[in-house]
């Protein structure tokens, strides 16, 4: 059993004020393999105090100084990439090849994005003949990150805060904390001044709430469920701190009649990737009636062809979902889909054949789904695809927008004008057309119950800054 009870506070690894053990479970075998301690108020206070004390000096560092430290962090990250892949594979069940490429790669990609964005970022400018504007770091930031894309989210927050000149306290998910503990070692190796970066493990009701309510925390950047995001926003309100959130999603993938033949297969793969544990996954496939029957067959075939297995095995497959809680939630929603009359065409309840332990879910496809069904409105966060037919462009847009979420929608068509027209009407922070990836530093974020704020590149840096206007400043 790995002993990872310590926290990283003020440049030192320290013991918790009061030990509160929690076992970290490997979702592939349901066995504990490490133990951490959940922090308490004294630990949170110590971390916030360290960040507060470090802020005056750190906030005055130059872009060049911060840029050099980000470059050193990227070097440290890349040097220990295999350790990071193993950590994420064990803690949240990412198949090792997927962990090495997508999960580790997300962290280095975003770090490089901040390194590219920072040199040209203008922190101050002349607004008028005698008025000057300055973008200043907001102060101490509380960073609360999820378990599904650990380094993607940690780096998006830490990299932006560093670039902006903020100090910070990171609370990673207590379900998947090992990668963040390793990341803290990388921050230390890169040479960040004591107190700039701090890490305290804990759960939402504990350290999460303590950060959200703390009078010396100026901002909370949270990624996780919409339910938790609402609670954090409420608890932060009395101190009037800034809250940026990246929350759930229920992305629609509109397959128009002229979409490429492979559009359905790729959409199903994107839904099942990471065992369906991505907030921007295209989990509702809206298919033109002329393509519908074929699309159902294609999606079902892809589900049946998607291998499922332990995270430690190399090769192309999906692993388990992260925990027993998630497994039971997903099973319940699959049962709900059947009960409400959706047509099950692949997968279904229970574990895949031959897997009796581990939180493995069968890649599942429902056809004949109506958008008012629970499986069409609820973020399942598992490898479950709902297929919905449509007749007209207007109907497709209406169905796609009929959700409380608004993170990522998808449009597939050979008609560029149709893609643009649909993208303009979709209510979401992002629209991916014809599966073309977004550029490095592109703003990631949503609208409505998918949250506020934008992460990545210069947009992410802006979230950690406040604007000051100064008159009487002549050119």
Image: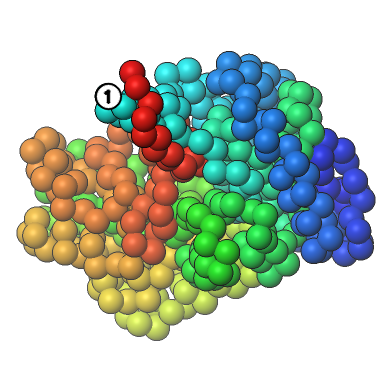
Q: Is residue 65 left or right of residue 427?
A: right
Q: Is residue 298 above or below residue 237?
A: above
- Please name whichever residue, 238 or 129, is drawn nearer the observer in this view of the structure: 129
Residue 359 image-quadrant placement: bottom right
Quadrant for the C terminus in the image: top left
Q: Is residue 36 left or right of residue 245?
A: right
* Image point (51%, 27%), residue name: 114
Q: Is residue 407 left or right of residue 312?
A: left
**Residue labelled with disc 1:** 129
Q: Is residue 73 above or below residue 278?
A: above
Locate residue 95, reporting x and y percent: 62, 42
Neighbours of disc 1 within 10 Å: few (<14), some (14-19), many (20+): few
- Please name whichever residue, 14 or 287, is drawn nearer the observer in this view of the structure: 14
- Please name whichever residue, 430 or 465, is drawn nearer the observer in this view of the structure: 465
Q: Residue furthest front?
A: 472
Locate residue 344, reporting x and y percent: 37, 70
Q: Is residue 318 above or below residue 133?
A: below
**Is there any visible trace of residue 321 in the rendered image?**
yes
- Please name whichever residue, 468 or 318, is drawn nearer the observer in this view of the structure: 468
Locate residue 474, reporting x and y percent: 34, 22
Residue 134 image-quadrant placement: top left
């Amino acid at each position: 059993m790995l002993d990872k009870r310590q926290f990283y506070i003020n440049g030192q690894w320290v013991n918790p004020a009061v030990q509160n053990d929690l076992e970290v479970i490997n979702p592939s075998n349901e066995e504990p393999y490490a133990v951490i301690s959940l922090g308490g108020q004294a630990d949170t206070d110590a971390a916030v105090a360290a960040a507060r004390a470090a802020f005056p000096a750190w906030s005055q560092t130059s872009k060049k100084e911060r840029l050099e430290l980000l470059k050193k962090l990227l070097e440290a990250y890349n040097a220990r990439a295999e350790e990071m892949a193993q950590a994420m594979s064990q803690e949240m069940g990412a198949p090792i090849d997927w962990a090495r490429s997508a999960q580790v790669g997300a962290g280095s990609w975003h770090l490089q994005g901040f390194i590219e964005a920072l040199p040209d970022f203008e922190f101050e400018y002349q607004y008028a003949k005698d008025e000057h504007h300055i973008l200043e770091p907001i102060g101490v930031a509380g960073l609360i990150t999820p378990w599904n894309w650990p380094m993607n989210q940690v780096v998006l927050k830490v990299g932006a805060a560093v670039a902006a000149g903020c100090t910070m306290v990171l609370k990673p998910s207590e379900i998947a904390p090992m990668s963040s503990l390793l990341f803290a070692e990388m921050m230390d190796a890169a040479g960040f001044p004591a107190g700039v970066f701090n890490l305290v493990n804990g759960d939402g009701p504990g350290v999460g709430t303590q950060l959200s309510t703390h009078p010396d925390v100026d901002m909370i950047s949270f990624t996780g469920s919409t339910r938790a995001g609402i609670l954090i926003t409420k608890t932060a309100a009395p101190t009037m701190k800034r809250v940026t959130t990246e929350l759930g999603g229920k992305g629609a993938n509109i397959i128009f009649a002229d979409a490429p033949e492979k559009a359905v297969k790729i959409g199903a793969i994107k839904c099942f990737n990471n065992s369906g544990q991505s907030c921007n996954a295209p989990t509702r496939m809206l298919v033109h009636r002329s393509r519908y029957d074929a699309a159902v067959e294609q999606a079902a075939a892809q589900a049946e062809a998607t291998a499922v297995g332990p995270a430690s095995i190399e090769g192309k497959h999906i692993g388990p979902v992260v925990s027993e809680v998630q497994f039971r939630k997903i099973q319940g929603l699959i049962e709900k889909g059947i009960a409400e009359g959706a047509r099950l065409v692949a997968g279904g309840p229970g574990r895949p054949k031959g897997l009796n332990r581990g939180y493995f879910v069968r890649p599942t496809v429902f056809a004949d789904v109506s958008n008012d069904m629970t499986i069409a409105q609820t973020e399942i966060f598992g490898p479950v695809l709902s297929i919905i037919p449509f007749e007209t462009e207007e109907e497709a847009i209406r169905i796609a927008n009929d959700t409380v979420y608004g993170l990522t929608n998808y449009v597939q068509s050979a008609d560029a004008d149709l893609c643009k027209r649909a993208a303009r009407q979709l209510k979401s922070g992002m629209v991916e057309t014809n599966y073309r990836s977004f550029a490095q530093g592109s703003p990631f974020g949503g609208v409505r119950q998918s949250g506020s704020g934008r992460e990545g590149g210069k947009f992410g840096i802006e979230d950690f800054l406040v604007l000051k206007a100064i008159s009487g400043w002549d050119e």
